[in-house]
Every structure is written in structure tokens, then in C-alpha cells.
Image (cartoon, rainbow, N blue to C red):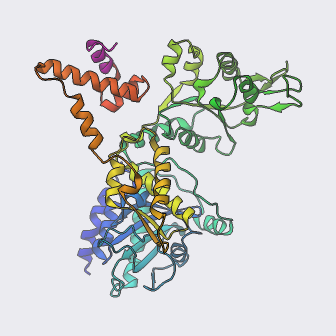
Amino acid sequence: MTTKEVLGAVLPALEALPGDLPDEQRFAPLLEAVRALLPCDATALLRLEGDTLRPLAVAGLTHDTLGRRFRLADHPRLLTLLQRRGPTRLAADCELPDPYDGLVQGRPGQLEVHDCMGCPLYVADQPWGLLTLDALDPRAFDAVDVAFLDTLGRLVAALVAVGERIGGLTRQAQREQQLARALAEEPAPLRHRELAGHSAPMRRLQREIDTVAGTDLTVLITGETGVGKELVAQAIHARSRRARQPLITLNCAALPDNLVESELFGHVRGAFTGAVGERCGKFELADGGTLLLDEVGELPLGVQAKLLRVLQSGQLQRLGSDREHRVDVRVLAATNRDLAAEVRAGRFRADLYHRLGAYPLTVPPLRERGRDVLLLAGGFLEENRVRLGLRGLRLAADAQQALLHQPWPGNVRELEHLLARAALRALAGQTPRPRILTLHAEHLDLAPAGGAAADHDAAALPSAGTSLRQAVDEVQRRLIEQALARHAGNWAAAARELGQDRGNLQRLARRLGLK
């Protein structure tokens, strides 16, 4: 291959590096260049994070691969590739399970990868990650020059380093030490959950988190049930100066009213029936760190007043005690309620609402996140693959389309549970047990894509004889009513769903007689 051909393939990758793009788009041209230079069906760029490889970009693999996390303890093939300094080609009859089985977008029915090469990437002489090449043909890499792949790997590593520096991405130090330490640790059964997503709403949310994380401002995290508000809180804490201190969580809805105050502020012996000793509350446990008040809208009004005092002065009294304790705690609050409406209804204190909402963040619902649903599905599929002891767990094309066309009223939590049920349904009755399990739309047990929506649209059509202006008004009225119903009366969330400014939407609603 000539130098001109190599440069022609690599130049588009160079041009993509300076853009303000997510990793998937930033490095996609780089992987396409690799596919143009080498005879592979699929290639992936994976970054080493502790004991796990995280896909940054893929080419020729299903989109849900980006949501998977490959723990080295679970994937000895990837570990083998990573531990060797130079490029490695694994034999076609290698017994080590391939993490990409069932994920290569190749010939229908051919699920297992037969030819595999990998090249570890080093940045500043530290192991950064891995470039993998896979083919369905067991002889695809027979003519590949290993020296050329080694040179290409060095070039990819250099481009990755430049791309990350331009993009301002943070990296963990001393990767080689992390790898050695991680491999010596006892592996956890499942991966740590993270706030994942490449869609525009999630990118905006990540930027907001980066903006507020380094401050001590109180953050009010709102969003529907199941969107991942607790993960947002964890991300804020992890990026704050308090990251080495504890993150304590209290679910305000899970406690009887008479115990909430004790849980928050602690109590002394004899403060109430059953208080047989002193106990510190969540504020004292979180001293120096962060306290997440989940479902904060459920707090009784009496406790709200005492919470406000702690937020203002940093001082608290244990229940039954006159002695004050001073604490240094950053408070994050989460709720799926419209607290402004709760204030108007007299169920939530206005002063506490404004104190908690110093920096409001809204987590977008899954239905507004586009192809993020497949990325999230990939992570849940990998968890279930490990849990069920399978070599591969994948989504068929019809299952992917079914997931993309669902409204997801239960959001990410609903997706997680649905995929767990689907894996069990698909596995039931299969003898012998398959090595690679494919989930089809029938296993998801979802309404056919478009069916319910079509019936709904037909029912929403105005009656015959209606003027055009009346028809438009009626459709707008129904759309606004439905959006408000889905968001429990939250005008800001309804406006985002409908692509409108909140003020304009409210003015339109008044004209239509909805306010």
C-alpha cells in the first residue's frame, strides 16, 4: 500500500479531531480509515478504564456495542491482546470466547467471529486502550503485514492523544499501574452504572453537570421516574472537590413521617419510643461530602423548615438534644414532582424550593434521546450475558426497531427490566443451551411499532366539517394536553417535548383555553 493511499485514508480522521463531537463521531473516521487500509469486517476503539475496556467508537458492529463494558476478567481474549506490547493475531480455532460474537454486521446467520487481531495503544508510554479488528472469514488476515499494523497502531495512538487533548477529555493517570492493580482485585459481579448517552439532550446535560460540579451550589435534579436522577447526582459528586468524601443518599419517600427527622439530623437516647441510644443522622454521615435527598418533594412541611435552617447555617440539632452540630455538606435534591406546583398548592415551602433550586437540572426522558436507547440496551445486555453465563447476547434488527419506536413511560428502568425479561423468555426451553442468544421483537413483548400510534392519530383527527383553523387549534390543544399529562403538569418538560419555548407554549395554551 502506497504512502498516498495511507494518507488519503487517514486525512478525514485528522479533520474530524478538532470538532466539538462525542467520541463516537470524533473517532468514527479513524476506524473507517482502518477498515479501508485492512481487510476487516469490524473494528473498534476501546479505552482502558481500570479493569474495564469501554468502546469509544465502532465500525461494522451493532450500535448497542457502544453501551457495553468489557471487564477484562470476563473477556480473556481482550486481556490477551492488551497484555502483549505489539499487534497479535489470535488463531481461528482459539478457544477464548470472542466478545463480538453476534455483534458483527455481516452475513445473516453467521454470528461468530473467525479471525481476530488486536493492537494495544500506548499514550505517553502508558497503556491507553486497544484497537481491535475482526472478520467473519477465518483467513481474512492471512496477508496482513504485522509490521504495518504496528505502525498503524502507533498512528492511531498518536491521533487519539491529539483528539483527546483537543476535546479536553480527562484521563486517569498511570494506566499501567491501574491495569496491574485491577487484575489483582476480586472482580465485581456487575459493572458500575454510569450516565451514558450520545444524544443532544444528554450532551447538554453532561455540559451542565461539568459546569456545576466544581461548585458547592445546591442542585435540584428533576425528571420522570426511571430517567436516572441518582446517576446524575453520582456524576456531580464524582466531578466535585468532594469526590473523595462520602455520597450519602436518603430516600425521603421510603420513611414514615415520624422517622424522617431522625434520619436527617439524628437523635439522642430517649428522644422517642425506641430511641435506645444516640445516633447521628445523614447530614453528619455526609460531613465533608455530599447528601442526596431523593424524592425531596415527599418531605413533611415541619421537616422542611428544619432542613432549610441547616442549609442556611450549616448547623443542626439531633432530635431530643439542645446541642448544635456544625456540618459541611453539599446538598443535591431529586424529585419527579413539579415543586413549583407543590409550592402553589401549599405542600412545599417556597423558601426551601428556591434554596434547593439554586442550580436546576432536568434529566431528559428516554423517548427524547433517540438512539441512546440502543446504547443503554447494550450495557444491560452485557450485564444479562454475564448473569446468564452466555457467550453472546444480541438484539435482532426487529428488536432494535421495536426499542427505538417505544414511548418508554418507565424510561431507563423500564428498558432494563424489559431486557432482563426478554433474555429469560428467549432462553426458556432452548435445548441445548445456545452459546449466542438473539433477542427478537417477540421476546420483548411490546406493542408493534406504529400500531398504537396509528390508532391514536386516527382518533385524534378532528371531525368532518371543521374549519382549518378550528382543526389546527383542536390538534394543538390535544397535543399540549397529552404532553402535560405525560409530564404531570410540568410546563417546562412539556415545552421541551413539543420543541417550544415555555413562555410561548403557555401563551398558546391560554389562547386555546387550557389556562
Q: Can see residue 19?
A: no
Q: Is residue 169 rendered to the left or right of residue 35?
A: right
Q: Residue 53: image x %, image y %? A: 51, 64
Q: Residue placed farthest to the front in the image?
A: 429
> What residue lies at 48% left-to-right and 66% top-to-bottom?
429
Q: Based on the displayed image, in which of its 4 quarters is residue 255 positioned?
A: top right
Nearest the eye: 258 or 191: 258
Q: Position of residue 108 (x, y in %)?
A: 30, 71
Q: Which residues are magenta?
A: 504-515
- Place residue 28 in its image quadrant: bottom left
Rendered location of residue 251, percent (x, y): 64, 33
Where 474 falls versus 93 (above or below)? Answer: above
Give the prevailing secondary structure in the magenta stretch.
helix
What residue is shown at x 71% (from left), y 36% (from top)? 288
Q: Position of residue 75 (x, y in %)?
A: 54, 71
Q: Inspect the magenta stretch and tell me whether residue 310 lies in it.
A: no
The quadrant the N terminus occupies is: bottom left
Q: Determine the residue positioned at 56% across, 68% down.
A: 72
Task: Judge from the rendering whether residue 108 lies leftward or rightward of residue 413; answer left or right.
Answer: left
> Is residue 509 part of the magenta span, yes or no?
yes
The answer, for residue 299, to whether it is visible in the render is yes
Relative to the observer, which residue lies in front, 454 or 1?
454
Q: Quadrant of residue 181?
A: bottom right
Above or below, 437 against 167 in this view is below
